[in-house]
């Protein structure tokens, strides 16, 4: 085993004395954990943990980290607290102010850590808290590092039913940051051995779209379509609405004056989230739990009900589970049918995105295996098996087992149809798409993935 030499990190190196990355690796320099922890807390973090980039549990994160910073050896995962009451206000401007402020803080703390490390000859980068992201990878993974997965490994908390990381002390009222560093530590942090989630399901009750399920499932499409209406795909849908409106009257028919102002506000000031109610209501965490344990009924009245009863527009995709959910559960909210803006550019993205778009309720009673065999531009064949049974979806690469429906054809035709740029009839007539099996089963398939 390589013997690591402990560095005296207290000393700042200057001018020519700064060690390059090469020297650092050659000497197998390791950093003192307590010193690094102090540095991060002084930079403004509320808690911090450290994970080796090649930890097998988060292999993909390690690979992505090296893509962004080839020398990456250690993840520094840190959290910054978010003001709870701002988040809980039914006034979203109040919540968004806090979100944006803490997001800036996370970026600033990351930057301060990087600068302090650099001054000591240690290379490091701080990927963004959220935005900007790698937009050219859209609609795939556009983020550099998954802060949640690293945070869990660093012992910063565990993802609750609502998929947010709950810190044992601060609860889920935190935003996360990660610094990638090219030095190693002698000792790394480990996951905490309990889940602070109480399984109280208040997040399920508060979510205006039904995205948070009581069994821990998450309807990505429902959350994304509403909460992110003024981000990425939602913004794209609005722009397409503007382009196709034809006239001022046409535009006004589609969009209210409030929507225009809201979009302007998001563009001018920074995109505004529509909800985040799951985060607002979560009572877990040592510092947070008191009022909930003291008076559960009162907590429900004061924190959960005002959000449930808020009169507001909820953006949903037509025919989605969210559309019927809002109508049933929230009589004071109105739905507006929009497109999510999530659409694939190639077959792989289509297969990859199916789990994010899958609408369980629409799949009721469907028991079918579909085979897709699509030919790409360079004659490359792209195959997948998609099974829907008991309202569960399974996507496998290649053609597996027997299928009731076989979809053959050109990748460009199928993707064009999914993107609503080509009609199915046109594709069938030109043999761009050939469907073998009961066409009604293909229609049912389409209804399971509205976008
Ligand atoms: C993508 C993303 C989203 C997506 C997906 C949410 C999700 N559950 O992952 C959407 C747009 C819906 C979203 C919403 C919100 N987010 Co967000 N988001 C991210 C981002 C960029 C990556 C998350 C991630 O790692 N996903 C992958 C895995 C780990 O997540 P998962 O839960 O297992 O997977 C689900 C989905 O992500 C999806 N999925 C899985 N893989 C992939 C791949 C692709 C390409 C896509 C599109 C989807 C997808 O399917 C899974 C099941 O439905 C991070 C920032 C970052 N760089 O890490 C912030 C982050 C997770 N978000 C955060 C916050 C605060 C929110 C919101 C509260 C936003 C708001 N202010 O309103 C809501 C809460 C929704 C919720 N309950 O999860 C915080 C969470 C803090 C915490 N305490 O945990 C983060 C860490 C930002 C930060 N730096 O603090 N977010
Ligand atoms: S609101 Fe309740 S169920 Fe949801 S994550 Fe928090 S503790 Fe868990």
Image (cartoon, rainbow, N blue to C red):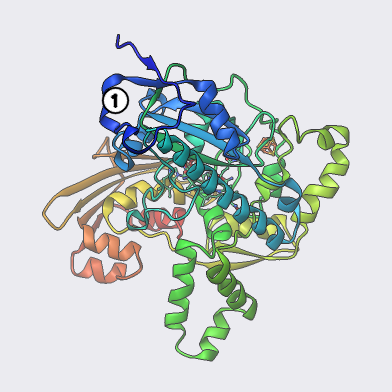
Q: In this view, does 147 lie to the left or right of 312?
A: left
- Give the percent coordinates (x, y) of residue 192: 58, 22
Q: Mark 1 points at which residue?
A: 25
Say few, some or many: other residues with alpha carbon within 10 Å of mark 1 (under 14 / 14 to 19 / 20 or more). Answer: some
Q: How many marks are shown on the rendered structure?
A: 1
Determine if residue 159 is in view.
no
Residue ID at (25%, 71%): 426
- The front one of 42 and 313 is 42
| Residue occupying the point 49% across, 73% down | 238
Q: In which quarter of the image is residue 291?
A: top right
Quarter assignment of residue 342: bottom left
Position in image of residue 203 (x %, y %): 68, 43
Looking at this view, name the residue that lies furthest to the top.
1
Q: Is residue 37 left or right of residue 374?
A: right
Residue 49 can be seen in this image: yes
In the displayed image of the protein, which residue is found farthest to the left?
379
Can you say whether 426 is above or below 438 in the image?
below
Asked if 361 appears above or below 72 in the picture, the reply is below
- Secondary structure under tag 1 reads helix
- Identify the image quadrant of the C terminus: bottom left
Residue 304 locus on image (x, y percent): 77, 48
In which quadrant of the rendered image does the N terminus lie?
Answer: top left
Seen from the viewer's position, the closer of residues 71 and 88 is: 71
Q: Disc 1, ligand 1: is the CB inside 8 Å?
A: no
What residue sits 47% from the left and 77% below the top?
241
Position of residue 170 measured from the top left corner of the image (x, y, whole percent): 69, 35
150 w.r.t. 31: above or below: below
Vertical side of 393 occupied by 234: above or below: below
């Amino acid at each position: 085993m390589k013997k690591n030499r402990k560095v005296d990190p207290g000393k700042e190196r200057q001018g020519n004395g700064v060690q390059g990355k090469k020297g650092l690796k050659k000497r197998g320099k390791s950093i003192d954990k307590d010193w690094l922890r102090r540095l991060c807390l002084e930079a403004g973090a509320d808690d911090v943990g450290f994970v080796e980039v090649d930890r097998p549990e988060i292999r993909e994160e390690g690979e992505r980290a090296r893509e962004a910073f080839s020398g990456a050896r250690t993840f520094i995962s840190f959290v910054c607290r978010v003001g709870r009451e701002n988040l809980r206000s039914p006034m979203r401007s109040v919540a968004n102010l806090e979100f944006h402020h803490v997001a800036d803080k996370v970026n600033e703390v990351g930057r301060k850590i990087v600068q302090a490390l650099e001054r000591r000859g240690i290379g490091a980068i701080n990927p963004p808290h959220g935005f900007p992201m790698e937009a050219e990878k859209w609609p795939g993974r556009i983020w550099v590092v998954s802060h949640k997965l690293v945070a869990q490994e660093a012992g910063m908390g565990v993802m609750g039913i609502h998929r947010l990381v709950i810190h044992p002390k601060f609860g889920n009222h935190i935003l996360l940051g990660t610094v990638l560093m090219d030095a190693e530590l002698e000792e790394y942090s480990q996951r905490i051995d309990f889940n602070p989630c109480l399984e109280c399901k208040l997040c399920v009750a508060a979510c205006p779209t039904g995205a948070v399920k009581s069994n821990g499932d998450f309807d990505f499409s429902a959350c994304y379509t509403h909460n992110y209406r003024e981000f990425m795909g939602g913004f794209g849908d609005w722009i397409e609405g503007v382009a196709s409106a034809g006239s001022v009257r046409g535009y006004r028919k589609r969009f209210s004056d409030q929507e225009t102002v809201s979009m302007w506000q998001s563009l001018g000031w920074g995109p505004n989230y529509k909800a985040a109610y799951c985060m607002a209501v979560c009572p877990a965490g040592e510092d947070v739990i008191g009022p909930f344990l003291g008076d559960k009924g009162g907590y429900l009245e004061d924190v959960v009900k005002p959000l449930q009863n808020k009169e507001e527009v909820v953006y949903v995709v037509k025919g989605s589970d969210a559309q019927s959910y809002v109508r049933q559960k929230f009589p004071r909210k109105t739905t507006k049918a929009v497109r999510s803006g999530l659409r694939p550019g190639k077959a792989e993205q289509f297969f990859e995105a199916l789990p994010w778009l899958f609408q369980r309720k629409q799949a009721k009673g469907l028991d079918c295996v579909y085979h897709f065999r699509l030919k790409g531009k360079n004659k490359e064949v792209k195959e997948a098996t998609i099974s829907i049974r008991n309202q569960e979806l399974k996507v496998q690469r290649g053609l597996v087992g027997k299928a009731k429906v076989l979809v053959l054809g050109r990748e460009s035709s199928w993707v064009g149809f999914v993107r609503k740029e080509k009609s199915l009839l046109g594709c069938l007539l030109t043999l761009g798409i050939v469907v073998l099996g009961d066409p009604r089963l293909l229609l049912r398939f389409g209804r399971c993935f509205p976008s």
